[in-house]
Image (cartoon, coloured by chain):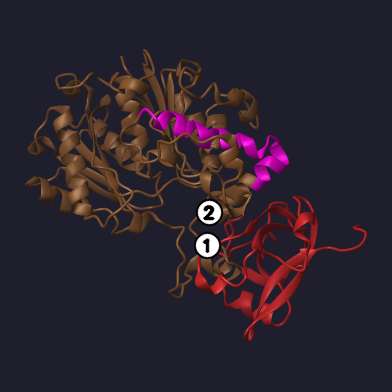
Chain colours: A red, B brown
C-alpha cells in the first residue's frame, strides 16, 4: 500500500495519491476518493511546501530504534496543494525554538539505509 | 411482531475488583471478582444474566464466552466482544443498553478488565513493528506509544490556536488527585500542586507524565436492564436518559478533520438532542481522562463552556472540585483512581446518583453525564435519578 510512497522518496519525491476524476489529494491512500467516490488515481509529486499544523518534541522513545534519536520532532504538515491535506512527518535541521503553528516548511530527506525518508525543515529566507 | 424494540433502560448494579499498582494478575480472576460484585450489588444471581458485552484490545480482557463459563450461565440471549476502536469501556454499556431496549435480552452484564502488562503503552518496544495499513506512513517517523504523540500535538495546537495555557491542563490533573483523596479504590491519593504539574517530566512537548492516566490491574463491571426490572431490584433507580456516538469527519486519530475535538462535538450534539435534560441540569460530570486534553475537549464539546474557554471557566479548579458548580471526575478519574479504561466513569456516576459515595458524594446529585474516548471513537451517556 505504501510502496509507491517509498519508491518515490528514494528518487527524491513526495508522492501522493490524487484522484484522476476530481483532482483531490488523499493521504494516506485509499481505494476510493472520499470526495467524488471514483476509483481512479495517479501518484503525483507534491511541491513539498507547506506549513506546520501541529507538532511535538518526542523526549521518550516508544521503540528502541528511536532511542538514539530523541529528542526528535514529529509534526503534522499541511501541504499547500489543498486545504486540510496533512502528512505526518519529522521536522529536521531546524531550531526547536522556532517551531510554531503556521511556520512555513519545505521538503527534505534523510537516508535510512537504502531508503529515504521524506521529511521537512523550516523554510529559510523570505516567504512569498 | 412481539419484540418491543424500544424500552427504557437502567444501570442496576456496579462492581469492581481490587485495583492494584503491582503484581502479575490473572484477568479471569479480576473479571470474575468485578462481575460477581456487580451482580450482587443489583441483588441478582449470575443465572439472572442473559447477555454479556465486553470491551477489550483483543486478549487483554476475557471474552464474553469466558465470563459466561466462569459465572455458570448456560446460554446467552445476546453477547458482544467489542473491539478497541469503540468508545472505550463505555461502549460495552452502550451496546448493552441498545440490546436491552430492543428486547433481545433482559439483563446484561458488561465489563472491562485491564492489567498493567496490557495497559502500559509507555514502555519501550524492542520487537520489530509490523506496520500494517496507515501505520506505514507514521511508524517510520517515530510516531508511537499508541495515541500519546497525537495527544501531545493536540495539546500543542490547542494552546496555539485557542489560547489558554499549559496550566489549564494542570487544573484537570490537580483536580483528579483532590477527588481521589475521598476514594479508597484510587491508587494515587496524594494531592499534587500546580507546581508539581509544571515540574512533571516531559514525555513529548508539551505533554507531561501528569497529563497521562495511570496504569493499574483491575476490572470494573455493571448491570444494564430495563427500568421496569431495575425498579424491583436492590438499588435506587438510575435511568439511562440518552446515549450517543460520534466519529467526526475523516475519522482518524492522526488525520481527522477536527484534530482538536475529533468526534466529541457531534457526539455531544446528538446526546443533548436525545436527552430530557440540558447541560445546565448536570450535577456531576465523569469525563474520560486518559489524557487531560480529552477531558477539556468534552467539557467544551458538551457545552459547559465555550470552545477555548475551559481555563477561565474552571476558575482555578474551584468549579470542578469538591463543592464546585460542576464536580468533575469525582473518583479521581483514570489519572488517579487508575486506568480501568472507561467503564469506571459510568460506575462512579451511578454511585453518585445513588448517593453512595460517602466523603466524595455530591449532595443531591440527580443528573450525570458520562463520556468516553476522543478522536474517531467517541461515546457518551446521560444518567438520571428519577
- Could you tell me residue A36's position as x and y percent? 61, 55
**Element type where label 1 sits in the image:** loop
Mark 1 Cα-neighbour bin, 10 Å: few <14, some 14–19, many ≥20: many
Mark 2 Cα-neighbour bin, 10 Å: few <14, some 14–19, many ≥20: many
Are discs 2 and 1 less than 8 Å apart at CB?
yes
User: Magenta stretch mostly in which secondary structure?
Assistant: helix
- First to last magenta residue range: B156-182
Say which quadrant the C terminus of chain B sits in. top left
Say which quadrant the N terminus of chain B sits in. top left
Q: Which chain carries label 2?
A: B
- Could you tell me residue B20's position as x and y percent? 30, 46
- Could you tell me residue B113's position as x and y percent? 28, 48
Left/right of residue A94 with respect to residue A62 in the rendered view: right
For the point 73% across and 52% down, which residue is it? A83
For the point 61% across and 47% down, which residue is it? B154
Seen in the picture, residue B65 relative to B228 is either above or below; the reply is below
Q: Name the residue under label 1.
A: B144
Q: Which mark is residue B148?
A: 2
Residue furthest to the bottom:
A114
For the point 17% across and 28% down, which residue is it? B42
Left/right of residue A79 with respect to residue B305 in the rendered view: right
Left/right of residue A114 with respect to residue B226 in the rendered view: right
In the image, B365 versus B254, the foreground residue is B365
Cα separation between marks 2 and 1: 7 Å
For the point 29% across and 43% down, which residue is it? B19
Residue B367 located within the stretch drawn in magenta: no
- Could you tell me residue A104's position as x and y percent? 81, 57
Residue B257 is at least partly visible in this image: no
**Element type where label 2 sits in the image:** helix
Seen in the picture, residue B72 relative to B1 is either above or below; the reply is below
Amino acid at each position: 500500500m505504501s510502496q509507491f510512497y517509498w519508491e518515490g522518496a528514494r528518487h527524491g519525491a513526495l508522492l501522493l495519491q490524487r484522484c484522476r476524476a476530481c483532482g483531490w489529494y488523499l493521504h494516506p491512500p485509499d481505494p476510493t476518493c472520499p470526495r467524488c467516490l471514483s476509483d481512479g488515481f495517479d501518484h503525483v509529486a507534491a511541491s513539498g511546501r507547506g506549513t506546520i499544523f501541529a507538532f511535538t518534541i518526542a523526549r521518550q522513545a516508544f521503540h528502541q530504534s528511536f532511542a538514539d534519536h530523541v529528542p526528535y520532532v514529529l509534526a503534522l504538515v499541511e501541504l499547500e496543494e489543498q486545504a486540510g491535506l496533512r502528512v505526518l512527518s519529522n521536522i529536521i535541521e531546524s531550531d526547536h525554538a522556532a517551531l510554531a503553528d503556521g511556520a512555513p516548511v519545505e521538503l527534505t530527506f534523510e537516508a535510512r539505509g537504502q531508503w529515504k525518508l521524506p521529511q521537512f525543515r523550516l523554510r529559510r529566507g523570505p516567504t512569498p | 411482531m412481539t419484540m418491543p424494540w424500544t424500552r427504557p433502560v437502567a444501570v442496576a448494579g456496579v462492581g469492581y475488583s481490587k485495583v492494584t499498582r503491582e503484581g502479575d494478575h490473572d484477568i479471569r480472576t479480576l473479571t470474575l471478582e468485578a462481575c460477581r460484585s456487580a451482580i450482587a450489588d443489583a441483588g441478582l444471581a449470575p443465572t439472572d444474566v442473559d447477555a454479556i458485552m465486553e470491551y477489550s484490545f483483543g486478549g487483554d480482557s476475557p471474552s464474553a464466552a469466558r465470563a459466561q463459563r466462569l459465572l455458570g450461565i448456560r446460554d446467552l440471549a445476546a453477547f458482544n466482544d467489542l473491539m478497541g476502536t469503540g468508545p472505550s469501556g463505555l461502549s460495552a454499556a452502550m451496546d448493552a443498553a441498545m440490546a436491552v431496549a430492543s428486547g433481545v435480552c433482559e439483563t446484561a452484564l458488561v465489563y472491562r478488565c485491564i492489567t498493567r502488562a496490557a495497559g502500559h503503552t509507555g514502555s519501550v518496544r524492542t520487537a520489530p513493528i509490523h506496520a500494517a495499513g496507515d501505520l506505514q506512513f507514521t511508524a517510520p517517523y517515530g510516531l508511537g506509544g499508541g495515541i500519546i504523540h497525537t495527544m501531545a500535538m493536540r495539546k500543542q495546537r490547542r494552546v496555539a490556536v485557542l489560547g489558554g495555557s499549559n496550566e489549564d491542563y494542570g487544573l484537570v490533573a490537580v483536580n483528579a488527585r483532590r477527588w481521589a483523596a475521598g476514594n479508597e479504590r484510587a491508587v494515587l491519593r496524594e494531592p499534587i500542586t500546580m507546581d508539581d504539574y509544571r515540574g512533571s517530566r516531559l514525555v513529548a512537548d508539551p505533554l507531561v507524565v501528569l497529563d497521562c492516566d495511570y496504569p493499574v490491574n483491575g476490572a470494573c463491571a455493571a448491570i444494564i436492564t430495563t427500568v421496569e426490572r431495575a425498579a424491583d431490584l436492590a438499588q435506587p433507580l438510575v435511568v439511562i436518559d440518552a446515549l450517543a456516538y460520534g466519529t467526526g469527519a475523516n475519522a482518524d486519530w492522526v488525520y481527522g478533520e477536527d484534530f482538536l475535538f475529533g468526534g466529541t462535538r457531534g457526539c455531544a450534539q446528538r446526546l443533548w438532542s436525545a436527552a430530557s435534560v440540558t447541560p445546565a441540569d448536570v450535577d456531576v460530570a465523569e469525563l474520560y481522562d486518559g489524557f487531560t486534553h480529552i477531558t477539556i475537549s468534552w467539557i467544551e464539546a458538551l457545552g459547559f463552556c465555550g470552545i477555548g474557554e475551559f481555563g477561565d471557566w474552571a476558575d482555578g479548579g474551584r468549579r470542578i472540585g469538591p463543592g464546585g458548580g460542576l464536580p468533575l471526575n469525582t473518583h479521581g478519574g483514570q489519572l488517579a483512581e487508575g486506568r480501568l479504561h472507561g467503564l469506571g466513569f459510568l460506575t462512579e456516576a451511578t454511585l453518585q446518583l445513588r448517593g453512595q459515595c460517602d466523603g466524595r458524594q455530591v449532595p443531591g446529585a440527580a443528573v450525570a453525564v458520562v463520556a468516553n474516548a476522543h478522536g474517531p471513537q467517541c461515546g457518551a451517556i446521560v444518567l438520571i435519578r428519577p
